[in-house]
Amino acid sequence: MSPPSLIQTHPKLTGAAPIALSYELFPPRNAAAEESLWATIRELESTNPDYVSVTYGASGSNRSTAVALLNRLLTETTLRPLAHLTCVGNNAEELAEIISELLDHGVRGILALRGDLPKGASTAPQPGQLNYAQDLIELIRRVEQRRTALLCAGKVAIGVAAYPAKHPESPSEQHDVEVLLAKQRSGADFAITQVFFHPEQYADLLTRARRAGVTIPIVPGVMPLTSVRRLERLATLTGVEPAPALLEALGRADDDGERRRIGVRATVDLARAALDAGAPGIHLYTFNEHGAALDVLDKLQLLRPGRPALPRRTLAPA
Ligand code: FAD
């Protein structure tokens, strides 16, 4: 047996790990939404997140606005974007082309997803298609391999989805963990969770995943929910049951201010419980709004590295 390394005998050399911070944004649907999104981006930028993720619309319908937003983030801000990408809506050739395009623009992080199937579509694997997130991870790694020399400034970080509450199509929570392990084996570097409302669901996922051999970071995704309508819409979209107590409290609130306080408090409690369970970071689903997200951040007081303010990159004149 070899003697312990310097790092093992001096654990303080590596220091306490800071808590990762990231936000989710979606591409704007019109000019007014774009203007308000950019006000949000500037507010979020001032909190020095580790990355901001940009969603990819159902069936790839918003490909061009997603790419345009990623480009602006790269060229006009100090933020590092994580591009969501889904198998649904594109064939393998198109996906390889999109991955190449993202890498050419300077994106170095991709969240590899299957995407939600269109209503009524079969869940059975389709020949000639990428059927699972795992297939997309393997494709990203293949495109990356062909560009090794171009990427000497960094490897592509691949994130994947994880589910504290069972995925609606999955036979069991154990199956979800086996799928997560398969994604790790195919080359995933980290996972972000679907929304959840009960802290024990995240803690249980961590326990089950670690027991199964999943070693990648599993970052809890939390969403400040400040209206009953949004909570119900989210439940329909994700299949995640909203917490009855939160629904009731939001329903009883008299005005928007009280609803915001209730939503923020619930999110802070959930995030604190996840951190206590060992969460390596917090991913905030923002709905393209910064108010509630910044309230949550303010109350959480995360252990974050102090970073010197970076000069903002600006577009070169044409
Ligand atoms: P997969 O991991 O492929 O799983 C899909 C289903 O197939 C699961 O039921 C799983 O159990 C099963 N499965 C997986 N692999 C296998 C296998 N080898 N054999 C048998 N069964 C298998 N959707 C969007 O459209 N755009 C987005 O931008 C977006 N962003 C998201 C961000 C996060 C953080 C999360 C958690 C979800 C996001 N989604 C997004 C939703 C996501 O696309 C859906 O939850 C989708 O239904 C599953 O995607 P997945 O990547 O988990 O799929």
Image: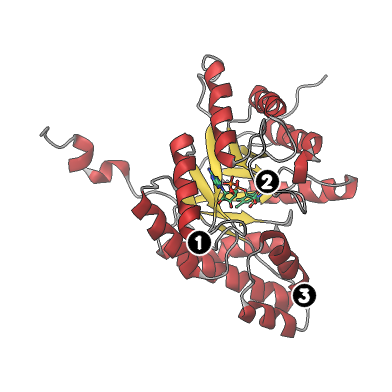
Instruction: Please give the residue where the numbered disc 2 appears in the rendered image.
Output: 115
In the image, residue 56 sits, relative to residue 163, either above or below, namely above
Q: Secondary structure at mark 1?
A: loop
In the image, residue 254 sits, relative to residue 123, either above or below, namely below
User: Relative to residue 239, is residue 283 drawn left or right?
Assistant: left
Q: CA distance from mark 1 to mark 2?
A: 33 Å
Sequence-first disc among 1 and 2: 2
In the image, residue 269 sits, relative to residue 105, either above or below, namely below
Kindly indicate whether the residue at mark 3 contacts the one at mark 2 (C-beta within 8 angstroms): no
User: Horizontal and vertical percent for residue 49?
Assistant: 57, 47
User: Relative to residue 29, is residue 112 drawn left or right?
Assistant: left
Q: Residue at x 67, y 60 (%)?
A: 238
Q: Of 315 and 216, which appears nearest the observer?
A: 216
Instruction: Please give the residue where the numbered disc 1 appears in the rendered image.
Output: 301
User: Horizontal and vertical percent for residue 119?
Assistant: 77, 53
Q: CA distance from mark 1 to mark 3?
A: 24 Å
Instruction: Please give the residue where the numbered disc 3 appears in the rendered image.
Output: 256
Sequence-first disc among 1 and 3: 3
From the Cβ of disc 2, is ligand 1 less than 8 Å away? Answer: yes
Q: Of 89 and 274, which appears nearest the observer?
A: 89
**Residue 278 seen in the figure:** no
Q: How many marks?
A: 3
Q: Amino acid at mark 3?
A: Asp
Sequence-first disc among 2 and 3: 2
